[in-house]
Image: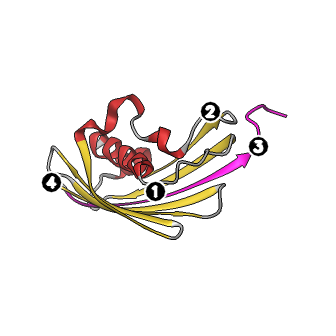
Amino acid sequence: MKAVLLIATAALLLFADSAPAQEMPGGLWEIKTKADVPGMPPELAAKFGSHTITSCVKPGEKKWSDQRNPNGRDKQCETLETKVEGNKIMWKMKCKDGTSADSVITFNGKDAYTMDMVMNTESGIMKMHSEGKRIAETCTAK
């Protein structure tokens, strides 16, 4: 299960190949993720089903495309096709373990996005929804 969630996280970052090469706005980002995995035991659902992370991006530090390969995690998966329509990027992914996914990310201005993914794994179908938003212009506590 942990491996599936790592693949899902890496998949979220794969969109950057097609994202505009614009600068990722600096500041504190909050990313909320919810995974729906049928048959997941309650103790795992409590641990992995929903989580929120925050990430600090310094002004000028990153472009959306810089998110492509954090720590080499996405080497197990490849993007098969990508389509850009307006503020949406859709892609299909295939991993070496047989997992596949269809995903769409929607940019809501420069400071927020949503992402939906349906993954087909050997354990069944997993659905994941993420919402990211810039919650502060700086990362320092006030």
**Distance between the Cα atoms at labels 2 and 4?**
38 Å
What secondary structure is the magenta-colored segment mainly? Answer: strand
Q: Residue furthest top?
A: 71
Whether pointer 3 and pointer 4 mark residues with C-beta atoms closer than 8 Å, the reply is no
Picture coordinates of residue 97, whole percent (x, y):
15, 45
Residue 118 visible in the snapshot: no
Q: Nearer the viewer, mark 2 or mark 4?
A: 2
Q: Residue furthest bottom?
A: 85
**Distance between the Cα atoms at labels 3 and 1?**
25 Å
Q: Which residue is mark 1?
A: 34
Picture coordinates of residue 119, whole percent (x, y):
28, 59
Instruction: Work out whether residue 120 or residue 75 is closer to the camera in this orientation and state it.
Output: 75
Whether pointer 2 and pointer 4 mark residues with C-beta atoms closer than 8 Å, the reply is no
Q: Which residues are magenta?
A: 124-142
Q: Which residue is mark 3?
A: 137
Q: Amino acid type of disc 1? A: Lys
**Distance between the Cα atoms at labels 1 and 2?**
28 Å
Q: Which residue is mark 4?
A: 122
Q: Which residue is mark 2?
A: 61
